[in-house]
């Protein structure tokens, strides 16, 4: 019969072995990435974020939703690009799917996105089309728009977070497409809770298609001083006054994207829902996007130039699941960066 001391010794040996195996795995991943031409992981500089991601994936990425799928994501810097590969399975317990507003079940995806590691602002903002705005650090995409229009009139696109239509959004502001793609329409509450512990913090939540980082709703009162108090940042969009001109008629009430207008200086953020600020990851400062509790929730414009990898894949942009909607064919989406939606099936 083993004594308590014997059990304790055995437990200690197992713990040391597990830690050694984890460290060896990390070294192996680093050597593999270097051999493949990616920058090796380090605790300083640009790759500080990748090391934190590796630790987070190894320790926390164990949630298995119904079906036994496990969260998988890798983020590396290769040839001037941040390359993000993920299966789109969340690292938090999602809501119940299917549900009354969403008949779809979560299934793994094959995301392979790249964004500039050192993004630059473009001459003018680029409007978000029917494709993901970016991807979260847990591998779930940010896809704020929905393929829902009033009587098929593409001038009157429903705002999915308005509550005017039931899209079956869960407590994480997400739902599922027919192809099983789970995606966020607003602040990913479960991810944000996990990263901040529920405390006010400037949390890196993901990367936009143009390469600029995406942060949560908190920011420093003085954007250039990390010692200044934190506050929830406000967008500069407001519901338009008065009546709608045509379309569904009635007063502007936020049911449609067209109900909102940008008012410079009305909030803390610009028309892309971003600002320049110092952060823990970027102590010298960077332009970054902010996910807000009010419209646009997730930005609808890019400060830089979105990478074409987002046009081809993910829930929007004509991928396997079509544009995000409820299975109905919407109006055509055209213009630069707007590939035609897949008309074989609708999307959420």
Image: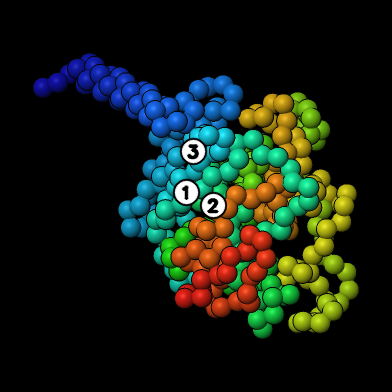
Instruction: Tell me: residue 47, above or below residue 203.
Output: above
137 relative position to 218: left or right = left
Give the percent coordinates (x, y) of residue 73: 44, 43
- Residue picked out by circle 2: 309
Give the percent coordinates (x, y) of residue 22: 34, 26
170 relative position to 299: left or right = left
Residue appearing at x 67%, y 49% in the figure: 305
- Residue picked out by circle 3: 75
3D distance between C-alphas at marks 2 and 3: 15 Å
Q: Earlier in the sequence, mark 3 or mark 1?
A: 3
Marks 2 and 3: which is nearer the front?
A: 2
3D distance between C-alphas at marks 3 and 1: 10 Å
41 relative position to 259: left or right = left
3D distance between C-alphas at marks 2 and 1: 8 Å
Q: How crowded is the residue under tag 1: few (<14 C-alpha within 10 Å), some, or many (20+)?
A: some
Instruction: Tell me: residue 43, above or below residue 231.
Output: above
Q: Is mark 3 on a helix, strand or loop?
A: strand
Q: Is mark 2 on a helix, strand or loop?
A: helix
Q: What numbered label is drawn on residue 4?
A: none
Give the percent coordinates (x, y) of residue 64: 37, 50
- Residue picked out by circle 1: 112
Residue appearing at x 50%, y 35% in the figure: 78
Is 291 or 26 nearer to us in this picture? 26
Is 186 or 154 nearer to us in this picture? 154
Is 30 or 221 nearer to us in this picture? 30
Residue 190 visible here: no
Q: Which residue lies furthest to the left in this view?
A: 1
Pointer 2 with pointer 3, Cβ within 8 A:
no
Pointer 3 with pointer 1, Cβ within 8 A:
no
Q: In which quarter of the image is residue 26?
A: top left
Q: How crowded is the residue under tag 2: few (<14 C-alpha within 10 Å), some, or many (20+)?
A: some
């Amino acid at each position: 019969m083993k004594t308590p001391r014997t059990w304790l010794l055995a437990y200690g040996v197992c713990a040391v072995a597990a830690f050694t195996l984890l460290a060896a795995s990390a070294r192996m991943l680093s050597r593999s990435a270097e051999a493949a031409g990616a920058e090796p992981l380090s605790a300083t500089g640009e790759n500080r974020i990748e090391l934190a991601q590796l630790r987070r994936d190894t320790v926390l990425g164990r949630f298995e939703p119904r079906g036994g799928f496990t969260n998988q994501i890798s983020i590396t810097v290769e040839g001037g690009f941040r390359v993000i590969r993920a299966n789109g399975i969340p690292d938090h317990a999602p809501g119940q799917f299917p549900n009354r507003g969403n008949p779809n079940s979560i299934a793994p995806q094959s995301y392979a996105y790249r964004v500039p590691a050192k993004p630059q602002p473009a001459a003018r903002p680029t409007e978000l089309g029917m494709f993901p705005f970016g991807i979260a650090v847990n591998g779930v995409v940010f896809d704020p728009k929905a393929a829902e229009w009033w009587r098929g009139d593409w001038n009157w696109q429903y705002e999915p977070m308005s509550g005017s239509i039931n899209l079956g959004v869960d407590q994480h502001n997400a739902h599922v497409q027919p192809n099983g793609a789970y995606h966020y329409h607003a602040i990913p509450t479960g991810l944000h809770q996990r990263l901040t512990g529920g405390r006010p913090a400037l949390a890196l939540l993901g990367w936009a298609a143009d390469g600029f980082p995406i942060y949560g709703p908190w920011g420093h009162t003085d954007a250039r001083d990390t010692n200044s108090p934190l506050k929830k940042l406000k967008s500069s969009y407001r519901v338009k006054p008065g009546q709608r001109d045509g379309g569904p008629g009635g007063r502007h009430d936020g049911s449609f994207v067209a109900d909102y207008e940008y008012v410079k200086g009305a909030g803390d953020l610009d028309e892309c829902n971003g600002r320049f600020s110092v952060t823990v990851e970027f102590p010298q400062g960077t332009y970054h996007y902010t996910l807000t509790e009010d419209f646009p929730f997730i930005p609808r414009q890019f400060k830089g130039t979105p990478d074409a990898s987002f046009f081809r894949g993910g829930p929007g942009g004509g991928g396997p699941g079509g544009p995000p909607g409820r299975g109905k064919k919407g109006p055509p989406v055209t213009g630069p960066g707007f590939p035609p939606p897949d008309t074989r099936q609708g999307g959420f």
